[in-house]
Amino acid sequence: MEQNPYAATATPVSTPTGTQIDTLDVSDRWKQYFKGLQKYGGLEGQLFKAIPKGPERLAAAKEMAPPMSAFLLAFVFGFFYYLVKGMWKKGLVLALMTFVGLTVLVTVLYLIGGETLAGGARYLGGVAFGIMAPRDFYSFKVLGDKGWLPVRPF
């Protein structure tokens, strides 16, 4: 009998519970972020999208907000932030992706005469790291994703 290597596993992967998140070796603020994200549907946030606009949605958004220090540190240190957190594979891929993307963007901007915009494009790499770091850390710590690709869905 031939097996399909791309078929789904027989046992579904269980989603972590709050008690499993409590046992992680991260700060209380990270645990609060992980629990909020888990409560509203994980990275895809299906349950968050179902909440109508209003005070409930604002409260949910506060629960799902990552620590601001994660944005700032990842923006400033980029790949080295990922390295310290143990996600060097994802950091390396993200660094290469931003390098290639920014090289193309800056080249195009220079060719069309946008030297001023090209000078400001250097900050986009830090922005990419800042936006992706909390999501990648969630997938690394809670979901156990130790792969190379930055987390999906975007």
Image (cartoon, grey):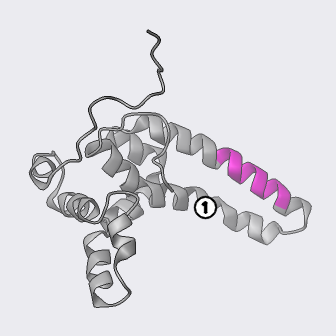
Residue at 34% x, 90% y: name it: 54
Highlighted range, magenta: 99-108
Q: Name the residue rendered at 39%, 55% in the picture.
A: 135
Q: Is residue 102 left or right of residue 48?
A: right
Q: Residue furthest front?
A: 1
Q: Quadrant of residue 147?
A: top left
Q: Within the magenta stretch, is there residue 107?
A: yes
Residue 81 pos. (x, y %):
39, 48
Disc 1 secondary structure class: helix
- Could you say which is closer to the camera, residue 143 or residue 118? 143
Q: Is residue 1 on the magenta stretch?
A: no
Q: Position of residue 24 (x, y in %)?
A: 15, 46
Q: Which residue is mark 1?
A: 124
Outermost residue on the top side: it is 1
Judge the density around disc 1: few (<14), some (14-19), many (≥20) Cα neighbours within 10 Å.
some
Q: Main secondary structure of the magenta part?
A: helix
